[in-house]
Amino acid sequence: EVQLVESGGGLVKPGGSLRLSCAASGFTFSVYTMNWVRQAPGKGLEWVSSISSGSDFIYYGDSLRGRFTISRDNAKNSLYLQMNSLRAEDTAVYYCVRAGATGSYYRDWGQGTLVTVSS
Amino acid sequence: EIVLTQSPGTLSLSPGERATLSCRASESVSRNYVAWYQQKFGQAPRLLIYDASSRATGIPDRFSGSGSGTDFTLTISRLEPEDFAVYYCQQYGNSPFTFGPGTKVDVK
């Protein structure tokens, strides 16, 4: 069974930093592109960042580039998102998501971790 | 960036009825790379359809996807009680990959 378990969310002040982690199991983590997708309270879904299986290709949403850094450790079956210079509009549930084998649809989702940016 | 528009915003139907959800793209989606997701309150989204018309593993055959170019449709042939939820379309043919705003299917 595929499992994606996020951690690291919480309350942080504007301008602060957080590091999200995602522990993956139940599949060969090292061969899949992984993603972070977020959802602000009561709002829709927003793609945040993607990282290819070997970390060769990394992409970010336009509003996030320069503040967020995605990374992975295939030996530990783990995905990370380092978030700096956080703003109130970054408040959201952050989902760790496995891409499909044949395309960049979002095949499997974690339960999400809530990040709240507030003073 | 491709903008996706979903209609209607809310669809009020009864169990057993047919639901037809629309997703329109601001420009043609490469290779018809469109997916549909279902999200119930307090839960993570679940993949239903990918590549416009392929059902994901374990998805009942009452869910079907169709369309090409800029117009895509998710059809639920007969609504079951567990199908009342929010549905999002997503295009992954043109970077950045984008989502539609969602259609809520609620009980009439």
Image (cartoon, coloured by chain):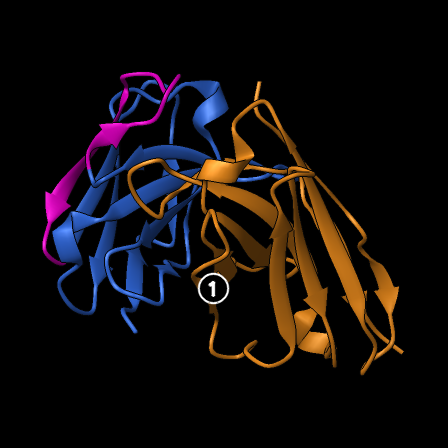
Chain colours: A orange, B blue
Q: Is residue A113 above or below residue B107?
A: below
Q: Position of residue B31 (x, y in %)?
A: 13, 51
Chain identifier of the residue bearing label 1 in the image? A
Residue at image point 35% right, 67% down: B96
Q: Residues within 10 Å of mark 1 (few under 14, many from 20)?
A: some
Residue at image point 60% right, 42% down: A74
To which quarter of the image does residue B59 belong? top left
| Quadrant into which the N terminus of chain B falls | bottom left
| Depth order, front residue of B107/A7 | A7
Left or right of A29: which side holds A118?
right
Instruction: Reply yes or no: does residue B67 show up in magenta.
Output: yes
Q: Which residues are magenta?
A: B53-70
Three-letter code for the amino acid on which mark 1 is drawn: Ile
User: Circle 1 sits on which residue?
Assistant: A58
One can see residue A79 in this view: yes
Q: Position of residue A52 (x, y in %)?
A: 45, 52
| Depth order, front residue of B49/A29 | A29
| Depth order, front residue of B88/B97 | B97
Residue at image point 41% right, 52% down: B102
Instruction: Reply yes or no: does residue B1 show up in magenta.
Output: no
Q: Secondary structure at mark 1?
A: strand
One can see residue B108 in this view: no
| Quadrant into which the C terminus of chain B falls | top left
Q: Is residue B39 above or below residue A104?
A: above
Q: Is residue A40 above or below residue B86?
A: below
Residue at image point 20% right, 40% down: B52
| Depth order, front residue of A19/B17 | A19
Q: Position of residue B101 (x, y in %)?
A: 41, 59
Q: Position of residue B21 (x, y in %)?
A: 27, 43
Left or right of A19: which side holds B1?
left
Number of marks in picture = 1
